[in-house]
Amino acid sequence: MKNEPKKYASWRQDMVEKQIVRRGINDPLVLQAMRKVPRHLFVSEALVDSAYGDFPLPIGEGQTISQPFIIAQMTQCLELKGHERVLEIGTGSGYQAAVLAQMVYKVYSIERNNTLFLQTRKLFDKLRYHNIVTRYSDGTQGWQQEAPFDAIIVTAGGQKIPTPLIEQLAVGGKLVMPVGDHFSQELIRLEKTLDGIKPTNLGGCRFVKLIGQHGWES
Ligand code: SAH
């Protein structure tokens, strides 16, 4: 980022080294993207100085931006190379989408909360993330017109992975989502192959609720 106060650049490099590299994330594309995206611009003004901390933060409307390490872990498990079209469910602050946009060809991001949808669309335009397209709708139904996607990332938790999302994943594609009940969830990664769906459990996590037709009731 040009013209940003030096402290943010230095906090961001520290964040990547101490919270991400040291905990074993080694995909160069992920590290490069997280060294670049100005996380402090995705939180409210009162929280800018906490933006590079090792924790999630509130983003308004009862929602949260995940801890940097969780973002890194979810992004790395998609094994992106650069040419992909990626679907994100739960735009929220826009930080996760911005990290992806730095790495791939195009990001499709859906948000169901209108306030967050409008606010974050404005931010993407201001920061010139021109390869992020956004949509205001129920993401549990996916984005049929743009399917199939090379990767899908769901940044809110549900009891099961919505069937439309599995259908809209390309063969060879990967999907990651927190799956569980109100209290605890596990990060599940699916790989779609010609022989079927292969799940992997990446460990415990805690996310806000995925609300919609194939998620929790509002
Ligand atoms: N990726 C976001 C995380 C935001 S928290 C970030 O980087 O900040 C999860 C978001 O998912 C919330 O904004 C919430 O409103 C949204 N959400 C919940 N259910 C949804 C659904 N069915 N479709 C789209 N967005 C949903």
Image (cartoon, helix red, strand yellow):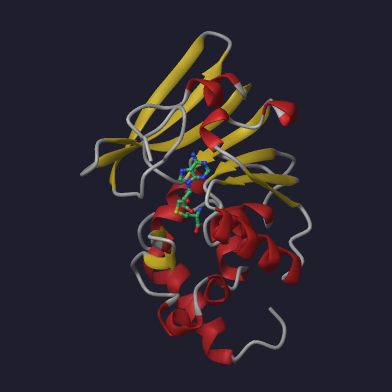
Relative image position of residue 38 (x, y in whole percent): 59, 73
Look at the image and tell me in which quarter the N terminus lies: bottom right
In the image as oriented, which residue stretches furthest toward the left? 183
Residue depicted at 46% across the width and 46% down the height: 155
- Viewer-proximal residue, 7 or 14? 7
Q: Quadrant of residue 39?
A: bottom right
Q: Is residue 182 left or right of residue 31?
A: left
Q: Is residue 25 visible?
A: no
Q: Is residue 122 above or below residue 202?
A: below
User: Horizontal and vertical percent for residue 157?
Assistant: 37, 41
Nearer to me, 92 or 196: 92
From this viewpoint, is residue 39 visible?
yes
Vertical position of residue 14 compared to residue 180: above or below: below
Tell me: residue 200, above or below residue 60: above
Which is more toward the observer, 20 or 182?
Answer: 182
**Split into 4 quadrants, where in the image is the C terminus?**
top left
